[in-house]
């Protein structure tokens, strides 16, 4: 019993951060309609700013830094500066990113906030020396004894702080004039403007307040939770789960739910140490819990979640199919052959990776661009394909094309499973579910030591009718036989997808995307079309995952981690998510692809890649929601004079 | 005697504690254009939503004698019950031809197979529908580029694709000018001539009087009158519902 | 009687398709102009254009002698206030919060509450729990607290019982007289609307087909009825 109490209090620190993130997400959603994926990254930034101040006395800004004195700064001034700098960062996010996007479709808002989340997180290792910096205590280190167990006073203070901060946010919305006005704007923005209120200014205030609140709790909790160059970014997931559990309306419920998730994770940790607890469930369960909660919350409450009414809505970017697919395919095939023939070693590896990534981006074009379902789980589908492939080739001895079909088939099933919540939720909330699902699959499956063979996830190279198609042959890092295999598989699938998108399938996808009600009224079974879209998308990603597996010969959790997945989404969006050509561009600029190889080998800028990708995403979302492919064809249109019919 | 193509019995809709439709009995036979009129807020669109399954209701709805009131909207559409929307709700990303072709209801797997082997579904005669409504010249344009009158006609064409037997038109003439409204009327009449039943909701009394065989009048969610357009428009209760008590000439 | 609101040759609509064409009308202070016509005739479109929600494709809208500002809230603060048919009240807020939302120093809350004494009893209640008639009263009161100079009122009687409408409409006459507000009133209860209005315009298929002093239109009911019912089937007095 005393042990349970101990683990409950140990969960307070994490729970407090989840709680304040959840409360901030609810408040921000009320004020702006944005579901902010970057709230965890804001906390991450604040924690590192304080650590650096207390280490060297230097205030680090996203660009440049200000030395404040020669030695370490004291704890409380440093914490105060940390809170201020995060509040300023949040305000900048509002002014530069979210205010211009306030009438943009949900997809643009989601990718912008995902981009911001990645940008801040990838900026941390670049701006701070993450080696050997610790978060020294800020709160008291005293302990007290209760019910036979030793409890850290700081954990109790964190609990109280989280509750106080949430209560303060709640009181702001309930009792102050600005708060009441914010609630009015949340209910009906048009009516609020007609009453003479300025929702933009109220939103700015809310960004400041929530940025400060999140930073305060995270900074106080950092000495307990430890400094981590990335971890806080993912604290947004339990935060989002708690926020959705509170139906995005009650700040206090969101706060309590966040605390409960923290405590639950801590208790799961305790349970996993008991004898008889299954080995496979020892790792990753704490990450799977938020996903289960989100799914349950959305399925039960789904239809009652409020969608904030906006002033005007901008349509999803228009789609465009290749007008002459066969000649285009011929040119691309020749280009691929040339690129493979002229390169070798790491450059050829970059080319092959780009082609594979184009296939994964294509899976997003199908699902997000055409069907309008925002999925952040594409890399989890690919990973499923890759990891099943490892078993299929090593343990079950399934021969080459069948092994790919089997693995992609399993990925398809996972896709349908992740797609089920899409029958109840849409837009940004679906993005939360899919991201939580991706993290759950990553932590509970890919990174689970109990599911990983002793020698690692090896993959046996493909052979067909006695031909060796394996990626390596002696010192040749990327054989032309393997490259040709990739080109053929991706080419055939791409042509099939173009056919599908040009046919009834594409039409019914677009019908669902543009108007679900009207689609049902013309006899389209919206639920089955959505599941078909998830299945098709997961199949394509699964094949892509198999090809990645073959190209690496061995897989680790890093091959498919969520950051890579989000980068691919960024690239697909930047390339143009509603166009097949956009997938091609996405492939070229994807992680480990041609552009990455260029940055890495020629310019030596490899470690800036994620930052560049994330910033490109935010810029694209704000300036040109159609993406590169759409943008250029739009320019061409403008230059072509209209035909005059007399 | 054959059952009417569309029949509702005791159709009732509650919104919260408010009754938006009360005990509506209505029927429409093959070849008939039936009008449904009433002042703003009388519950006309609610009735269309209830019949087509977009809002929960009590009472029965049957199409040619077959009960459909337990079916989902897309299943009712496949049973032959189609509607248009007040705001058009055309698929803005699809061309006019695709807007019509996508209707009618096939499963996604069937679509997938058809697309991959390049087979057209037998019985899909989209061009014939387009030609009936004079839409062939604009078949490859997006609906947003057409005049409002044309858009309304695309909505009707989309509702007729497949095996539609009953079509419910929700304020199709709103926003049309006088000529467009008259042209629209001839199209609606032509649809009924093919043996389908048409339920027309509209405020344009000229249009209603010109093309409807019978008219039902709703006020505060209940039918207050029914009969031929001449009878109904002369009914003092109807004039009161529209104009307020003192203005009845 | 100074001119408060003026529409000149306004053509407006949605997605590039005009819903109203060539609308010209003006409203002076203390004057009520009723805008009548069947559903779909373009009344709400005209009102939304006058409020600045829709930008006219051609023609101009000016309030208080200058073109409308770009931001809706600027127009609202300048005294051009729309009461939409959805009433524009906030259901999650209390009556008091609704009334004091955009309060400025010189508000006239007491004076307004004198006009709607029933609201005094309801100040602490959530707006969502009010009856339709009470909500409509609140909508008018909320608009008046900001000392508007022009009120644009859209279908106040939507969803209200006739008794409630008969009680509410005369208060619009009172506030026009008392606060010298210019009112552009869209109302489907034609006779009631004409009984409180100074002038009226009738829209049909997006154009103004009839305009004149309210008293004249009241006297010549057939002309109005014709706009609604087309050539009236009960009369043979069609123009030769």
Image (cartoon, coloured by chain):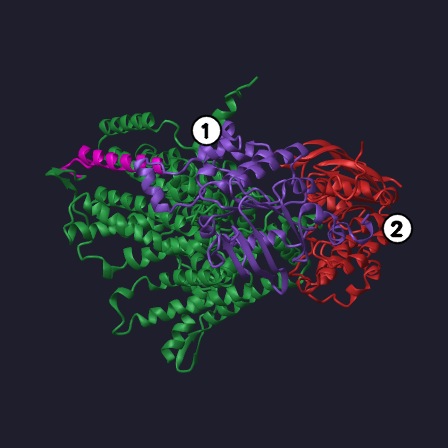
Q: Is residue B161 left or right of residue C164?
A: left
Closest to the observer: A186 or C170? C170
- The residue nearer to you, when weighing A618 against B167, is B167
**Secondary structure mostly seen in the magenta stretch:** helix
For disc 2, the neighbor class at 10 Å (few under 14, some 14 to 19, many from 20) is some
Mark 2, secondary structure of its residue: helix
Which marked residue is nearer to the observer: mark 2 or mark 1?
2
Measure how far apart labels 2 and 1 are at the Cα level: 59 Å
For mark 1, what is the residue? A632
Q: Colour of chain A?
A: green
Q: Quadrant of residue C136?
A: bottom right
Which chain is painted in purple? B
Q: Which residues are magenta?
A: A472-500
Mark 1 chain: A
User: In this picture, is A39 found above or below A273?
Assistant: above
Q: How many marks?
A: 2
Mark 1 Cα shell of 10 Å, populated few (<14), some (14-19), many (≥20): few
Horizontal arrangement in the rendering, residue B231 relative to residue A524 (left or right): right
Could you tell me which residue is drawn at 62 percent across and 33 percent down? B183
Residue B41 visible at all? yes
Residue at which label 2 appears: C177
Q: Position of residue C140 (x, y in %)?
A: 77, 55
Q: Is residue C16 above or below residue A122?
A: above
Does residue C50 appear to the left or right of B113 in the view shown?
right
Q: Position of residue A605 (x, y in %)?
A: 36, 37
Q: Which chain is red?
A: C
Which residue is most to the top? A646
In magenta stretch: residue A495: yes
Residue A307 visible within the image: no
Please, which chain is the residue tagged with disc 2 on?
Answer: C
Residue A104 vs A290, above or below: the answer is above
Q: Are marks 2 and 1 in contact (CB under 8 Å)?
A: no
């Amino acid at each position: 019993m005393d042990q349970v109490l101990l683990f409950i209090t140990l969960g307070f620190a994490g729970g407090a951060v989840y709680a304040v993130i959840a409360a901030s997400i609810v408040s921000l959603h009320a004020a702006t309609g944005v579901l902010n994926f970057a709230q965890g990254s804001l906390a991450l930034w604040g924690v590192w700013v304080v650590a650096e101040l207390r280490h060297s006395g230097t205030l680090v800004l996203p660009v440049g830094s200000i030395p404040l004195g020669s030695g370490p700064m004291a704890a409380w001034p440093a914490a105060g500066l940390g809170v201020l700098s995060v509040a300023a960062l949040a305000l900048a996010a509002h002014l530069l990113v979210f205010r211009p996007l306030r009438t943009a479709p949900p997809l643009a808002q989601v990718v912008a906030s995902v981009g911001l989340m990645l940008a801040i997180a990838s900026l941390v290792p670049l701006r701070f020396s993450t080696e050997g910096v610790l978060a020294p205590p800020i709160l008291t280190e005293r302990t007290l004894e209760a019910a036979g167990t030793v409890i850290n006073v700081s954990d109790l203070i964190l609990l109280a702080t989280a509750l106080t901060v949430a209560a303060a946010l709640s009181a702001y919305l309930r009792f102050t004039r600005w708060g009441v006005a914010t609630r009015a704007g949340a209910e009906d923005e048009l009516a609020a403007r007609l009453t003479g209120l300025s929702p933009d200014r109220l939103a700015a205030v809310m960004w400041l307040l929530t940025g400060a609140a999140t930073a305060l709790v995270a900074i106080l909790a950092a000495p307990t939770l430890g400094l981590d160059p990335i971890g806080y970014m993912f604290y947004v997931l339990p935060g989002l789960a708690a926020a959705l559990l509170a139906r995005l309306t009650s700040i206090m419920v969101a706060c309590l739910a966040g605390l409960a998730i923290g405590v639950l994770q801590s208790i799961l940790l305790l349970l996993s140490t008991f004898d008889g607890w299954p080995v496979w469930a020892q790792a990753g369960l704490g990450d799977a819990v938020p996903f289960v909660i989100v799914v349950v919350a959305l399925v039960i409450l789904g239809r009652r979640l409020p969608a904030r009414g906006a002033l005007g809505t901008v349509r999803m970017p228009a789609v465009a199919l290749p007008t002459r697919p066969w000649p285009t395919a011929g040119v691309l095939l020749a280009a691929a052959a040339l690129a493979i023939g002229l390169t070798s070693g790491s450059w050829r590896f970059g080319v092959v990776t780009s082609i594979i990534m184009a296939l994964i981006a294509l899976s997003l074009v199908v699902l997000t661009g055409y069907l309008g379902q925002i999925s952040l789980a594409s890399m989890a589908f690919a990973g499923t394909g890759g990891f099943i492939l490892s078993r299929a080739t090593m343990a079950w001895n399934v021969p080459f094309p069948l092994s790919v079909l089997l693995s992609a088939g399993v990925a398809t099933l996972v896709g349908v499973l992740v797609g089920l919540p899409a029958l109840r939720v849409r837009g940004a909330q679906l993005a939360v579910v899919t991201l939580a699902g991706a993290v759950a699959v990553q932590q509970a499956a890919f990174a689970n030591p109990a599911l990983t063979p002793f020698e690692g996830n090896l993959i046996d190279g493909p052979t067909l009718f006695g031909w060796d198609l394996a990626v390596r042959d002696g010192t040749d890092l990327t054989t032309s036989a393997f490259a040709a295999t990739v080109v053929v598989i991706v080419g055939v699938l791409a042509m099939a997808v173009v056919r599908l998108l040009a046919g009834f399938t594409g039409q019914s996808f677009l019908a669902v995307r543009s108007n679900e009600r009207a689609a049902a009224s013309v006899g389209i079974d919206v639920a089955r079309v959505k599941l078909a879209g998830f299945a098709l998308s997961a199949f394509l990603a699964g094949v892509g995952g198999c090809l990645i597996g073959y190209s690496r010969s061995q897989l680790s959790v890093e091959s498919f981690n969520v950051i890579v997945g989000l980068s691919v989404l960024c690239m697909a969006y930047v390339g143009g998510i509603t166009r097949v050509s956009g997938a091609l561009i996405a492939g070229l600029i994807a992680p480990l692809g041609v552009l990455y190889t260029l940055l890495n080998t020629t310019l030596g800028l490899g470690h800036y890649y994620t930052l560049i990708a994330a910033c490109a995403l935010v810029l694209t979302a704000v300036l040109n929601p159609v993406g590169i492919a759409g943008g250029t064809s739009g320019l061409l249109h403008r230059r072509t004079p209209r035909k005059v019919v007399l | 005697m054959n059952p009417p193509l569309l029949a509702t019995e005791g159709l009732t809709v509650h919104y919260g504690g408010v009754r938006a439709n009360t005990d509506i009995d209505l029927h429409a036979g093959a070849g008939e254009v039936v009008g449904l009129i009433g002042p703003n807020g009388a519950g006309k669109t609610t009735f269309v939503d209830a019949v087509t399954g977009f809002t929960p209701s009590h009472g029965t709805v049957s199409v040619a004698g077959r009960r459909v009131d337990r079916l989902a909207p897309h299943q009712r559409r496949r049973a032959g019950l189609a509607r248009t929307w007040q705001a058009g709700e055309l698929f803005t990303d699809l061309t006019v031809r695709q807007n019509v072709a996508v209707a009618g209801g096939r499963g996604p797997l069937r679509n997938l197979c058809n697309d991959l082997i390049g087979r057209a579904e037998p019985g899909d005669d989209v061009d014939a529908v387009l030609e009936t409504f004079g839409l062939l010249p604009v078949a490859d344009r997006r609906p947003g580029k057409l005049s409002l009158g044309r858009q309304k006609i695309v909505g009707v064409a989309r509702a007729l694709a497949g095996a539609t037997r009953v079509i419910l038109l929700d304020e199709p003439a709103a926003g049309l000018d006088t000529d467009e409204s008259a042209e629209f009327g001839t199209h609606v009449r032509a649809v009924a001539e093919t043996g389908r039943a048409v339920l027309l909701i509209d405020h344009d009394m000229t249009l209603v009087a010109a093309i409807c065989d019978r008219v039902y009048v709703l006020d505060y969610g209940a039918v207050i009158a029914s009969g031929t357009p001449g009878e109904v428009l002369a009914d003092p209760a109807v004039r009161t519902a529209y104009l307020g008590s003192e203005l009845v000439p | 009687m100074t001119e408060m609101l003026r529409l000149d040759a306004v053509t407006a609509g949605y997605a590039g398709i005009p819903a109203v064409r060539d609308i010209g009308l003006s409203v002076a202070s203390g004057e009520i102009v009723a805008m009548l016509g069947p559903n779909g005739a373009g009344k709400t479109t005209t009102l939304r254009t006058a409020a600045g929600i829709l930008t006219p494709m051609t023609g101009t809208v000016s309030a208080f002698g200058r073109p409308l500002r770009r931001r809706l809230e600027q127009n609202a603060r300048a005294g051009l206030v729309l009461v939409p048919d959805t009433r524009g009240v906030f259901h999650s807020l209390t009556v008091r919060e609704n009334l004091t939302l955009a309060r400025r120093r010189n508000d006239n809350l007491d004076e307004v509450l004198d006009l709607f004494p029933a609201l005094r009893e309801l100040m602490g209640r959530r707006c969502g729990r009010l009856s339709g008639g009470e909500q409509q009263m609140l909508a008018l009161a909320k608009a008046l607290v900001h000392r508007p100079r022009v009120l644009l009122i859209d279908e106040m009687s939507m969803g209200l019982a006739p008794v409630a409408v008969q009680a509410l409409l005369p208060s619009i006459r009172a506030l026009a007289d008392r606060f010298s507000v210019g009112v552009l009133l869209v109302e489907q209860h034609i006779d009631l609307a004409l009984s409180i209005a100074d002038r009226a315009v009738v829209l049909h298929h997006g154009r103004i087909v009839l305009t004149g002093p309210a008293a004249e239109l009241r006297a010549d009911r057939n002309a109005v009825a014709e706009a609604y019912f087309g050539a009236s089937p009960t009369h043979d007095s069609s123009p030769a």
